[in-house]
Amino acid sequence: MSAIGIEMHDLCRKLFPICRSITGQGFRESLGLLREVVPELHVVEVPSGTRCFDWEVPKEWNIRDAYIVDPDGIKILDFKASNLHVIGYSVPVDKTISLEELQGHLYSLPDQPEAIPYVTSYYQERWGFCLSDNQRTELKDGNYQVYIDSDLKSGALTYGELILPGDSSKEVFLSTYLCHPSMANNELSGPVVTTFIAKWLKALQRRRYTYRIIVIPETIGSIVYLSKHYVELKKNMVAGFNVTCIGDDRAYSFLPSRQGNTTADQAARQVLQYLHPDYINYSFLDRGSDERQYCSPGIDLPVCSIMRSKHRAYPEYHTSLDDLNLVTPSGLFGGYDVLQKTILSLEHNEVLKATVLGEPQLGRRGLYPTLSTRDRPVDIKRMMDFLAYCDGRLSSIDVADKIDVPLYEMIGIIRDLKKAGVLKAAEL
Amino acid sequence: MSAIGIEMHDLCRKLFPICRSITGQGFRESLGLLREVVPELHVVEVPSGTRCFDWEVPKEWNIRDAYIVDPDGIKILDFKASNLHVIGYSVPVDKTISLEELQGHLYSLPDQPEAIPYVTSYYQERWGFCLSDNQRTELKDGNYQVYIDSDLKSGALTYGELILPGDSSKEVFLSTYLCHPSMANNELSGPVVTTFIAKWLKALQRRRYTYRIIVIPETIGSIVYLSKHYVELKKNMVAGFNVTCIGDDRAYSFLPSRQGNTTADQAARQVLQYLHPDYINYSFLDRGSDERQYCSPGIDLPVCSIMRSKHRAYPEYHTSLDDLNLVTPSGLFGGYDVLQKTILSLEHNEVLKATVLGEPQLGRRGLYPTLSTRDRPVDIKRMMDFLAYCDGRLSSIDVADKIDVPLYEMIGIIRDLKKAGVLKAAEL
Amino acid sequence: MSAIGIEMHDLCRKLFPICRSITGQGFRESLGLLREVVPELHVVEVPSGTRCFDWEVPKEWNIRDAYIVDPDGIKILDFKASNLHVIGYSVPVDKTISLEELQGHLYSLPDQPEAIPYVTSYYQERWGFCLSDNQRTELKDGNYQVYIDSDLKSGALTYGELILPGDSSKEVFLSTYLCHPSMANNELSGPVVTTFIAKWLKALQRRRYTYRIIVIPETIGSIVYLSKHYVELKKNMVAGFNVTCIGDDRAYSFLPSRQGNTTADQAARQVLQYLHPDYINYSFLDRGSDERQYCSPGIDLPVCSIMRSKHRAYPEYHTSLDDLNLVTPSGLFGGYDVLQKTILSLEHNEVLKATVLGEPQLGRRGLYPTLSTRDRPVDIKRMMDFLAYCDGRLSSIDVADKIDVPLYEMIGIIRDLKKAGVLKAAEL
């Protein structure tokens, strides 16, 4: 366990300092680090100006340097110290202004005076700096040189895509976003856990489903991807997961698809209910990430989210405090574990049917005790309960729900029952 | 607010002294006072003996005077002091009898010794007097002259009917009853609130639905009306409300239709849940008024009740204590307000559909902030939540239920989204 | 009440000492005692080796004597003192062995040191003795003579069957098992209560349904019976009950069919909810008796269980402590009463329809008070509530559920309403 957790945390550390946005070199560089783990992750570039549903791909933003020089000639809010100091998509600026004018371009959080907030302005041209409220209150009167060396010009939106073929053309979909600068739970945990899940899936001897995994910028990325692929996604998707905020140690959280009862929802809830019964069961009204697009009317994909502490639900959210102390190896592994077991459940989900009427005589097949006493081993009870519902109508995830055991825990028992000839896949 | 509340209370005061019953001059006179507010309220007379389903219209009852003269020659239980002293539909009587014989014709409430009960005998000929139990225990032995100057003869049952046409022939139905003598919550509040709702509806520039409003005697009135109109009612009714017990200050109450989940039920519950989340949610088993007829098997109309303190659920019910201290301007206005907002919700209930796939780019339409910070205004959240469910299948009341906001609060947002071209009525 | 309770307890006492197993003379002798109450109970013999679904009828087991002689020459664990001392289906043995070897053939309960456990080994040949743990710890070193005079040879499996014809070929099914040796709640209570229910049914002047009542050995008996009759059972069964553990005074319990919402489940729950609202509502996952077969996939019969203290849910279960102190006349009668009222509800379950639109005028039919006061008798309320739901769609058990009154309490009211011509059976 901890081995994968530590590997994931190490990858977070490599990614952390890079300045990412929804477009630009930082995104490409970060994708490159993921491709060191899964080289098959394919890089796609979509030119600025491309129409995608109601939107269009914005200009590409790149930034090289930014800082302010205070009245005493001291460099403050240095982009190189923290890329959160500059609001995303800031246009270039190089001038000297009064403190009063500067204040209109500063963002801080009076309630969390030690935190630098994360602020962006994707679709309107402006510039600004973010800083802790503590630092802000110490700024003295006088003239400040503000300097941002950025550019905003026609380029491309970049994303990563990986298709792992399976026995079936039906797909399980994983989507994660990589567009946030130096923050850890939201959002390095998502792409990092997804990358290691991709590595595990790739190594499987056999996959029942095809896996489609994308690493995109949030919102505009999912809109771009949907505008190119939604017909095939709607045709093939069995279950999908938006992987985000999955690396801290506090909570487990679930956010359903809009429909709320898809196979994806059911599989994820079953695992969470069993492993972490105190998980927080959010409403779709609490959504805030790419499920906004995946579940929009007319798109209606079965996409839900397995999370640790949900976006907006932890105090460090969208500030400099969302760092690599908040996200831990065990936190990342906990999320990885739930996602992996959910996928395992999906891989084994099928409609099963008992082959005999009445209970089978399992004693002579070595699957049932020959002596009747008051005690009944838990495995025997699970086996009998599972069999009792295999009526050729319920899916095996449905049956597992009925008997309060997650399907991934029943994989061995199902194999034994099939081998004993008393259970088979139903012809539908 | 208080202006309408005071106007309604004033009308109650004018109506209060009149002796009403299910037929007779008192009912006609009361209807006349409502017609001073809404002159379009049409008066219908149905002759005694008319068959209506399993019933027939009873003889018309009129009463001019009634009293008892006690052994000391003092006039007591004077009808002119309180019309509750005579049981409804009492036949004429003029004779002298012993106290013992008199007792068999007296009705009082030992548990509420200061209250005069309200008692009627519509369908069997008898006579009787009602009095407080305090007064009864003070009656002394001796002979009493009992005098009732009433008549019970072929005449008519009277009711009021108002049809306010709308864009659609589909109807919203309001029914209220005016047959009770001097009592205020049950029942002057119902006809008075209904009359002022009619006045408001009449003044609307445009009505989507046609409104059918009737002021009837309870039970026999709804049976008469149904027997004449149930085919068209079943064909056209979108939602109906039995307006009763809607004028005191204590509780808000809801009594569902028999089906329980009609559009009428849904609209009323949504408003009550939002404005008065501690409202009392009764079962159809608690019914006791004209919904008994509107929801009877084979009639099955979508009629429910929005109330303040429900019939039988407050101690003054059906006694002289149900007076104009119990019913107040603010009590009446509270009921009026819920009913009005429920009707507004119905007027704006339609199946809506987003016009674009994915979320629309609302920023460039001025409907979404261009700067991404951690805060999200509540109106933006409501707008995005509403849009997220506009899939061409759910009604806007359904969508409002999903997002825990009553539809009447969304009217402006829906107008903005339609104007922006991102939302439209679905073609069904 | 107590008369039937005492008769049932007397029958338990006659049956208690007999050594029963899934086959053999003890079962036949016990069936004979039931036939003294209901002579029509037909005896069926199914030869050893008969195939039944995935199973076959085992050899017949009979035992005449068994004991152990301890190192001091004292006879202990004497079968004649308690037939629980020998594990069921023990093969014959007659030899002298060391205490150490003997220990491998002994069964006791360290947690309940005074109880002799009940142990069987139907489908693997072995021998063994059961004893209290107190007695076991006092066994001294030395040689023990073990003696079991039993035989296990081709014979038959015996069961009882009673068909009581009714107006309809549709059937109510009662199944109970008689294969346990000297234990009282599990399981003399089941066959004894079933026998007295059969006696009551037999005496009814008229039965709407046909009753099929079987007294079988558990598991193999229901498998044998199903393998012979499941096609007609599936075709005709309206409701079925597995009658077991129905004689103690502690709890009332309900175990649903697998489907969970059949007419049988609904009828039983309605009676229990009304008479014993604190009854324990088990899940199908808590099953453990013949419902395992009746509800198995492909069989899917509407069979549930009304119980007092459920198998496995009381400490005396499957030990010598489950005796005639635990099972009492009032305990047996309580179970009988619930089962009888459930059957009465089924007999009166039909789809009813009001004959008039609107409420009927019940006053002129003498079914409604002619004077309107604030009080409403409970019977009138039940009558009006019942009528309000008779819409030609709901069954009368459904309607009774709606109005929170069990159908068996409504039998007289339904008869009155039918006689008054306002209610009739719906043409479906």
Image: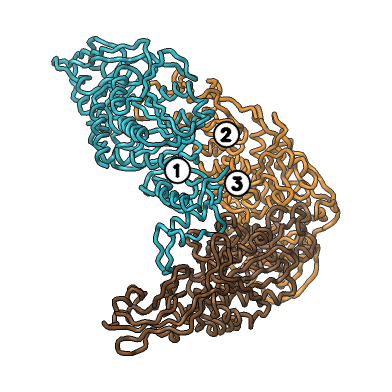
Chain colours: A cyan, B orange, C brown
Task: Answer left or right for A348 relative to A62.
Answer: right
Residue bearing the label numbered 1? A348
Which quarter of the rendered picture does the N terminus of chain B lie within? top right
Task: Answer left or right for C272 relative to B213.
Answer: left
**Number of numbered discs present?**
3
- Determine if marks 2 and 3 fall on one subunit: yes
Instruction: For marks 1 and 2, give the CA distance.
Output: 39 Å
* Pointers 1 and 2 in contact (C-beta within 8 Å): no
Q: Amino acid at mark 3?
A: Ile
Q: Position of residue C72 (x, y in %)?
A: 30, 89
Q: In the rendered structure, which disc, 2 or 3, sits on the residue that comes first in sequence?
A: 3
Residue drawn at x 33%, y 22% as measured from the top left: A120
Residue drawn at x 59%, y 64% as measured from the top left: C268
Closer to the camera in the image, B241 or A64: A64
Q: Is residue B235 above or below residue C303?
A: above
Q: Residues within 10 Å of mark 2 (few under 14, many from 20)?
A: many
Q: Position of residue B294 (x, y in %)?
A: 71, 48
Helix, strand or loop at disc 1?
A: loop
Q: Amino acid at mark 2?
A: Ser
Q: Chain of mark 1?
A: A
Residue drawn at x 43%, y 86% as measured from the top left: C81
Q: Amino acid at mark 1?
A: His
Q: Is residue B376 visible?
A: no
Q: Position of residue A129 (x, y in %)?
A: 27, 20
Q: Which mark is residue B396?
A: 2
Residue bearing the label numbered 3? B306
